[in-house]
Amino acid sequence: ALASRGFKCFGISLHYFLSRFVIASMTRCFAFALLACHAAGSVPYPVSRRSITTLFAVEEDGRSKEELLCLDSVAGNLARQSPQLYRVGKANWADQAVSDGYSDWLLDMQKKRGINVDSSLIGLSFQKVVQHFVSSNRGSISSYVRCNPGDASVSAAITYAAAGDGVLIAASQTVADALESAGVSQVKDLRGKAVRDVLADVLPRLSTRIFVFQDTSKMANLGDYAIFARAPSIAFGKDQAAQSALLARAQGPAAAFGWGPENDFVSTLNRHGVYVHASDWSKNLAALSNAPPAVHSIPTATAEAPRVQSTEALHTVAFLMSDGDNLQWTLGNWEVDKKYWGSPQRGKIPMGWTFSPSSAWVAPSALAKVLTSKSPNDELVAGPSGVGYMFPQTWPQSFRSDFSALTFQGMKSAGMRLVNVLGQNDNMPDMDSLSPLLASSDVDGMIYYGWGDGYASLKGKAFWVDSKPVITGRLSLWGEATSGLMLGVQPMVEALKKQAKDVSSAAGYSLVIVHAWSHNYTDAVTIAEALAAEGGFDVVLPSELVRRFKANVKPPSSHITCQCTHVGEGAPNNGYECTDPSKNAYCASTQFCMADGDWNFPVDGQWSQICQKTSISSAILL
């Protein structure tokens, strides 16, 4: 929210900022813009004026952060017309493609996307590289702005360059000298300044659909995309007045790149209709977002398996890899990493992979490569929580349909049929906030995660939106614990062996979260093989689990009644029992079961009057 009305920031009132907002809103598509201007509700991601023809590979090896920031400012400015610069890790980048994702994407663009890759700048000094781009693009590079390395002036410089035309960034004297030698002059010195000091001048020329929240210690990343997209760049929570002024202009649904303290970061931005792409270590997004995919056909869904009869003694399991919304990972080494998509075992067992539908715009050629390398035992699942990371609890109702439309568009491009949503807490899901994400006939169901217990806090509970199931994670392959809901490999095998083998009950299905930072594809294979040896288990893709669930588990009757077992008491006495025993469960560990007497099972997901955070005793004390 905006600061109080009388708040002053270095003598400039927020009233002044707001007056500029009005001007900006009336001049949204003014003449300075080189990028496509989108109306609210449309795709927020900008595109270059011309398609890519040639990318010059420039190696990072041996270059300082200050030099990389300057190269990013070159890349961002040139990409407004057509991307030309692409950063690779080492001089022998083509050989590195087997282990470096960014090199692999570039090699794929060269071999399959019709893009010429020029390595003639490899091995040249920073000054010669800069000289090449300046002399070749006199009309697109005009000046530079000076800042310090690693402090708030970096954010000010990136934001100033994003609002300008052809403005490069020098965060050291060495870089400034190289630019001067190339004939580029300083236009402004922002050393000692912050975003708030330039905001009044640049605000009307900044994007209202793309934002970058980047800690200045990571100054060598994301600068290209911020400048390309004319996006303000600021460290989250470090300058509240400037941050509030920027977010007040957001035209949702808007996208934020970068990162911050997760729950606070996502929920704060969500309130302004801004969803999140974890991407603070990302690079080359100005090029990747404009690289066309080769003509490819989206894999069709596999033929529907015979319906599992409800008399079978079988427990159905699906694995779903976490954190696929993290662009810096999926566009980094995920695709070549032997622990994940690059595993030589991939395809051995069914595996669901969360992946961002935004890749259809942010990295279309990368998405195309992933799709063409997908085995029949691989499935991409959208999210969390759709086209970008948001919490349904904090996402504005007015933006639900537009967010869902973007999600559906991205999902269709990626051949996705399921959406994965992460809740802000462990409360029961609110169906009103989730139903828009299930409103498309192309979406078959939802995998919903609570926040705690490795996303398994809702213990496999299932809900329905019309005829579509919303299934929660039952167990999480997360860490090496031997008890609880977050388990290591062998404890997970033992926990699954104890699950019900009844295909007609929700208890007969387990969605297992695979935590990407503590486990990998091989661990899932180990579990699947142990279950196969045990017998009575079927490991399937998440979409097949949803299909079987829908075919065999009846939606709960609205006439199911329940009672709190211990009204007003906390865990472990915060459970409830129902006339349908399969619905017996507990409120979240931080909640109390508060409803007196008999109550109808909330098939619509409205649990707020039943599971609450205030107990009877504390309510009396209040």
Image (cartoon, rainbow, N blue to C red):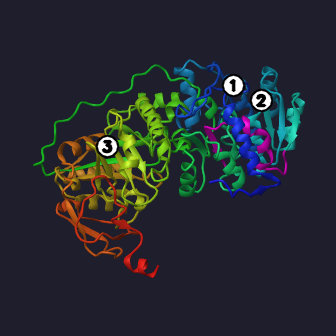
| Residues shaded magenta | 190-214
| Residue at left offset 40%, top offset 30% | 412
Q: Secondary structure at mark 3?
A: helix
Label 2, on which residue?
A: 165
Which amino acid, mark 1? Answer: Leu
Count of picture labels: 3
The span from disc 1 to disc 3 (Cα, nearest Å) is 42 Å
Q: Quadrant of residue 561?
A: bottom left
Crowd band around label 2 with a 10 angstrom C-alpha radius: few (<14), some (14–19), many (20+): many
Decide whether residue 466 is among the magenta residues.
no
Is 194 placed left or right of 513 in the picture? Answer: right
Label 3, on which residue?
A: 542
Image location (x, y in percent) of residue 523: 37, 51
* In this rendering, the label closer to the viewer, 2 or 3: 2
Give the vertical position of 341 relative to 594 (above or below): above
> Do tag 1 and tag 2 residues touch (Cβ < 8 Å)?
yes
- Looking at marks 1 and 2 on the same chain, the residue that comes earlier in the sequence is marked by 1
* In this rendering, the label closer to the viewer, 1 or 3: 1
Image location (x, y in percent) of residue 312: 12, 48
Is 421 placed left or right of 582 in the picture? Answer: right
| Residue at left offset 61%, top offset 42% | 250
Q: Quadrant of residue 429?
A: bottom left
Crowd band around label 3 with a 10 angstrom C-alpha radius: few (<14), some (14–19), many (20+): many
Q: Which mark is residue 34?
A: 1
Residue closest to the eye, 348 or 549 = 549
Is 455 placed left or right of 77 in the picture? Answer: left
Give the vertical position of 390 relative to 110 (above or below): below
Which amino acid, mark 3? Answer: Pro
Image location (x, y in percent) of residue 507: 22, 56
